[in-house]
Image (cartoon, grey):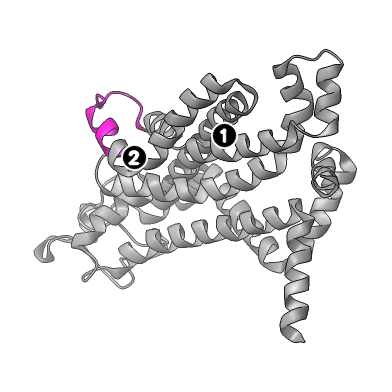
């Protein structure tokens, strides 16, 4: 009991300056985390500055350049590296001649927007359901627990394909993807929050809050939510790269973002017919997707260690045992 209380006490003050500095000091000792954070920051800045960078290059995402592709060869771009030039920094899209640099930047905006938005929906629903099951009676716990189990067992990607396919095309696709991925993927968060809530509500500070007359939701808001910050933040860092892959998969299957709006998954789907004639068109979106997911994964692991000092202690002890 004492060990658990000591672990959760700093998390309760996580927004405070002292605790934030402590987490930052732990993150600074991990070069991989700093590199990952720098990569993600650069990617976000590029995505946010996509219109400005497009204007700087003098191109846009949807203008066709038929004179830059060889119609006799089926639409392969002229020149090396997919037609890269001073006017088209990363070349052009096969078949259409649209600028690839600008489309990659706008594709990053879609991927990050959908992933972060869906993660926010998943965390919100998961925390609410997890608290309800952890603090509620047996009937509430049983009903919500069965719903959570069903969602965990169902194939998320298949359901997402079915739901996105039946919605009219006029509905904004990024918003649709956020809602579909968010409402289908909150079960993992709910399970984590429920398990932590069941553990925390037996501790002294929660019992004292109840004895002082606080209701379940007041206790949850003032006592439990601060202590749940660490596992929820850690799991959110894992959900973001997962949702990026899900969005790319849905766009790859043709039920995600619809043309002419660019998406990395949509580019990879189109690139199936061009990977031999124009490898750059495959490698650029695939490389960006890989680097983004890897950076989020590495940073998420570093955040988990920084928020849980016991994890770092276990790693040090294990390293000493192996060395001896």
| Residue 321, magenta (yes or no) | no
In which quadrant of the rendered view does residue 255 lie? top left
Residue to which mark 2 is pinned? 154
Residue at 43 percent across and 64 percent down: it is: 287
Q: Quadrant of the N terminus?
A: top right
- In the picture, measured across the screen, residue 288 lies left or right of residue 172, that is right
Residue picked out by circle 1: 123
- Residue 316 visible somewhere in the drawing: yes
- How much space separates mark 1 and mark 2, taking CA atoms? 19 Å
Is-magenta flag for residue 167? yes
Q: Secondary structure at mark 2?
A: loop
Q: Residue at x 54, y 25 (%)?
A: 141
Q: Residue at x 71, y 68 (%)?
A: 31
Disc 1 crowd rating (10 Å Cα; few below 14, some 14-19, many 20+) is many
Locate residue 86 relative to residue 38 in the image: left or right.
left
Q: Position of residue 187 (x, y in %)?
A: 48, 36
The magenta stretch is: 160-173
Q: Secondary structure at mark 1?
A: helix
Where, quadrant-wise, is the C terminus in this rendering?
A: bottom right
Residue 137: percent from left, percent from top: 59, 20
Which residue is depicted at the point 43% across and 33% down? Answer: 178
Is residue 259 visible in the rendered image? The answer is no
């Amino acid at each position: 009991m004492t060990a658990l209380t000591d672990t959760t006490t700093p998390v309760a003050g996580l927004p405070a300056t002292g605790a934030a500095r402590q987490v930052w000091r732990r993150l600074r000792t991990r070069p991989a985390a700093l590199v990952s954070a720098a990569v993600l920051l650069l990617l976000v800045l590029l995505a946010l500055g996509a219109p400005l960078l497009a204007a700087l290059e003098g191109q846009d995402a949807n203008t066709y350049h038929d004179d830059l592709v060889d119609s006799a060869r089926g639409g392969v771009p002229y020149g090396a590296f997919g037609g890269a030039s001073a006017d088209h920094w990363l070349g052009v899209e096969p078949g259409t001649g649209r600028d690839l640099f600008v489309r990659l930047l706008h594709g990053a905006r879609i991927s990050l927007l959908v992933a972060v938005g869906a993660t926010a929906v998943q965390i919100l629903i998961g925390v609410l359901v997890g608290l309800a099951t952890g603090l509620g009676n047996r009937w509430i716990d049983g009903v919500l627990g069965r719903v959570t189990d069903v969602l965990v067992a169902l194939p998320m990607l298949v359901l997402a394909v079915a739901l996105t396919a039946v919605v009219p095309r006029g509905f904004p696709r990024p918003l649709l993807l956020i809602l579909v991925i968010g409402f289908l993927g909150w079960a993992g968060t709910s399970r984590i929050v429920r398990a932590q809530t069941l553990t925390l509500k037996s501790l002294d500070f929660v019992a004292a809050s109840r004895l002082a007359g606080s209701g379940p939701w007041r206790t949850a808001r003032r006592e439990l939510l601060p202590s749940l910050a660490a596992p929820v933040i850690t799991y959110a860092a894992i959900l973001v790269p997962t949702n990026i892959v899900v969005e790319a998969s849905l766009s790859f299957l043709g039920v995600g973002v619809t043309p002419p709006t660019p998406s990395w998954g949509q580019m990879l789907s189109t690139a199936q017919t061009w990977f031999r004639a124009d490898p750059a068109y495959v490698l650029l979106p695939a490389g960006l997707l890989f680097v983004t997911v890897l950076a989020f994964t590495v940073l998420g692991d570093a955040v988990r260690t920084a928020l849980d000092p016991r994890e770092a202690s276990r790693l040090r002890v294990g390293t000493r045992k192996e060395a001896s």
